[in-house]
Image (cartoon, helix red, strand yellow):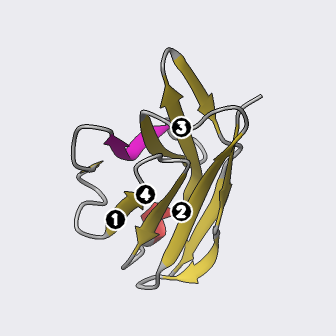
Amino acid sequence: QVQLVESGGGLVQAGGSLRLSCAASGSIFSLNAMDWYRQAPGKQRELVAAITSGDRPIYADSVKGRFTMSGDNAKKTVALQMNNLKPEDTAVYYCHGRWGTYAAWGQGTQVTVSS
């Protein structure tokens, strides 16, 4: 019943910026944690950023200093601000929400960075 939907992907030139959003809907009041993953063709899915109720956002080394994750306390809507994008950032980006013993994945949004 709980769904996560990503938005904000698109085509951008290297050095540009995009802001992704993930919105959770359904019978939940809040999430305990939200993660951003990405997967490029032929590559494994990798964790990009994550926030929990009790810690500061963490980032993969490949995006640290360029990406910023944010959200309200409920984490029902979170954002990933992506600056200084590089072609290697091209991937489908997925949000992953967790609450209690449950978890859900979004369907993904395509980010393409041209050179």
- In contact (CB < 8 Å): disc 4 and disc 1: no
* Nearest to N terminus: mark 2 or mark 3: 2
Residue 47 in magenta stretch: yes
**Magenta region, main secondary structure:** strand
Q: Which mark is residue 68?
A: 1
Circle 2 SS class: loop
Q: Residues within 10 Å of mark 4 (few under 14, many from 20)?
A: some
Label 2 and label 4: CA atoms lie apart by 23 Å
**Closer to viewer: mark 2 or mark 1:** 1
Mark 4: which secondary structure? strand
Question: Between tags 2 and 4, which lies in front?
Answer: 4
Q: Is label 3 in contact with label 4 (beta carbons under 8 Å)? A: no
Q: Mark 1: few, some, or many residues within 10 Å (few <14, many ≥20)?
A: some
* Left or right, 61 with reference to 45: left
Above or below: residue 106 compared with residue 16: above
Q: Which segment did they paint magenta?
A: 45-52
Residue at which label 2 appears: 90
